[in-house]
Amino acid sequence: MKDLSVIIVNYNVSYFLEQCLLSVRKAVKGLQAEVFVVDNNSVDGSVEMVQRRFPEVILLANQENLGFSKANNQAIRQAQGKYVLLLNPDTVVEEDTFLKCFQFMEAHPAAGALGVKMMDGAGKFLPESKRGLPTPWVAFCKVFGLSAMFPTSSVFNRYHLGHLPVDEVHKIDILAGAFMFMRTEALAKVGLLDENFFMYGEDIDLSYRIKQGGFEVYYFPETRIIHYKGESTRKTSVNYVFMFYRAMRIFAEKHFSGRQARLYSFLIRLAIYLRAAMAILFRGLQQVTPLLLDGLCLALGAVIGEKVVPDPLPLDVSTMWASYLGVWLGSAFFSGAYDKPFRLYRLVKGMLWGSILLMAFSSIVAIVGDTNKKHLLVAVLVGLVGMALWRLVWHYWQYGHWRLGEPKAKRIAVVGSGKEVKRASYLLRQAGAQEPLARLEPQHTPADLKQMQEVIEIYKINELIFCGKDLAVSQIIEWMVQIHNSAVEFKILPENSAYIIGSSSKDARGDYYALHIEVNLLNPYHRRNKVILNSLVSAVLLVLSPFLIWRIKGKKQFLKNCLGNLVGLYQWVGLKATSSSESKPTILSPVDKVSGRRVSPAAARQMEVVYAKDYTPYTDLLILARNISHLGRPA
């Protein structure tokens, strides 16, 4: 029997997985260990990377996304360790983390599982490192914000056990799925992860069952890990809200009964609707606010126009100002004025096209005279100045400079040996980022921290890159905690990696520097054109359906596809081999460009990568033209 089986479930986070496995490779020293990676059909080269860089890893490559529970159970059933560790791919462990956990469990035979002190990518403590059982009262406090209002209360914040000191060992109820170090004997008694949980909640369920099985669950802060968190979880999305609280409902139905179960179910449903409504409202406000501000600027321009050009407008024309604003804002939208990064020329182009359309319309219908055209001209000029000004003020508030469209300037320092600093500089250049302003070669003495703090202050550093080849993870984490500067972001360059990885907070998705490749399909301009093309093609197909339908297989499905594309539920051409659960259903794919030929899954993925990179509307039209008879396929 081995000492430890480490199990990592991966889905499309190759860059994080690589860094995680490098830290695991160091942490297993001194133990008889085996490492499993279960890949849930990633399309980002994760499988190839593991095969190439980590031949010692036992790789299980699934052909579909089985979810967290099923994928972990796959490996647990093959594991031979006295202890099993479930580890997230977006984590970095200290060199002695596994050994310390092993020794603690050996010294505490009643311990069935333990979790460690987790830090986010900015070096801040993650409160989910220790959690209480989500009873109805605990769930109520969490849902209605009492936990956040009283973070150290033993009454209102039992979800994160805020009253327990973070630097002391404690018996707790629930572990986080990012790091679950468990005794195999306990798993044999209580069972594996419940596969009814696809994602979220399975860690709560298993922790609870381990305690019910007579074992203790511990929070063990004598070692730390980085958990970037948020990389594959968009917590503002409605989809996340429903998935998480669905998991909570499954847990309640499984472990509670009677009045307690009904109360819990009510709270969970209430939480679903509240959080979903908040997510929709938040995202809606984010998208609508720029339009409202621009509308106010144009309305102000119209008022000033009446003062500058005093001839009164006829009543029937005055009532059309709302439509004028709609034309201007619509033109700005389709010109890319609301795409990121902001570019002033897109806004000017949108206003210009909107004005041309209005002038042309006014000439054709002969409603607006020459004087009223002057009103339009003054309105758009004043509105354009106002729109540029509010963007300028907002940009300065967010980034600290007046250069519209440019993000906050990176002031980077790299900590590592001369060779690794050069490699970091090369990767930064390849990614189009700023060159480092300062380079520090650590001497591994207490003076290192003081030197870094001085460099940060003198050069106004806002990003610090640590070279993983030269520095221990424990040292990196310690420096992150000690520096504790909200203005400084941290990233790590793993050994022999092409990525520089980091995350600014627990709620931010992890990010990285890598070679920049332009992907047309991700460009908002092309995505918008694709949506418009889908609707236009659907309208044309519906008009021509009496003539085309005789050539099409699946005639009812064809009409359904037309209607679905017309309203934006489907897309005619999209990604199938590389699609995610959030992708819209698609009828055809780039593979259909070579209709009549069978292609391997790998070839299909490669074709979709090329399609996404070089996408133009013409490509979609060509695929549609070659597959008229297949437009009745199910989406």
Image (spheres, grey):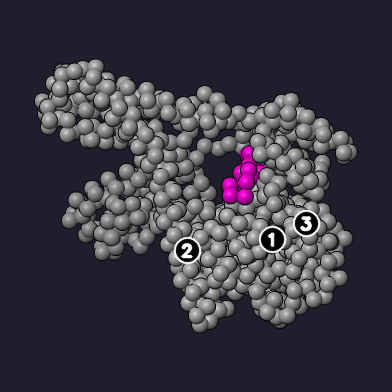
How crowded is the residue under tag 3: few (<14 C-alpha within 10 Å), some, or many (20+)?
few
* Residues at circles 1 and 2 in contact by the CB criterion of under 8 Å: no
Q: In this view, does 90 lie above or below 249?
A: above
> Residue 576 or 446: which is nearer the viewer?
446
Q: Is mark 3 on a helix, strand or loop?
A: loop
- Report the amino acid beneath label 2: Ala
> Residue 186 or 599: which is nearer the viewer?
186
Q: Position of residue 118 (x, y in %)?
A: 71, 55
> Looking at the image, can residue 213 be seen?
yes
Picture quadrant where residue 73 is located: bottom right
Q: In this view, does 453 lie above or below 378?
A: below
Inter-mark Cα distance, 1 to 2: 24 Å
**In the image, which disc is placed on residue 163?**
1
* Residues at circles 2 and 3 in contact by the CB criterion of under 8 Å: no
> Looking at the image, can residue 71 be seen?
no
**In the image, which disc is placed on residue 167?**
3
> Residue 227 or 500: which is nearer the viewer?
227
Check if residue 290 falls in the magenta segment. no
Mark with earlier residue (1, 2): 1
Q: Position of residue 402 (x, y in %)?
A: 52, 23
How crowded is the residue under tag 2: few (<14 C-alpha within 10 Å), some, or many (20+)?
many
- Report the amino acid beneath label 3: Asp
Inter-mark Cα distance, 2 to 3: 32 Å
Which residue sits at x=43%, y=48%?
Answer: 283
Q: Which residue in the structure is indicated by mark 2? A: 271
Picture quadrant where residue 218 is located: bottom right
**In the image, which disc is placed on residue 190?**
none
Check if residue 497 falls in the magenta segment. yes
Magenta part, dominant SS = loop
Q: Position of residue 77 (x, y in %)?
A: 69, 74
Magenta span covers which residues? 496-514
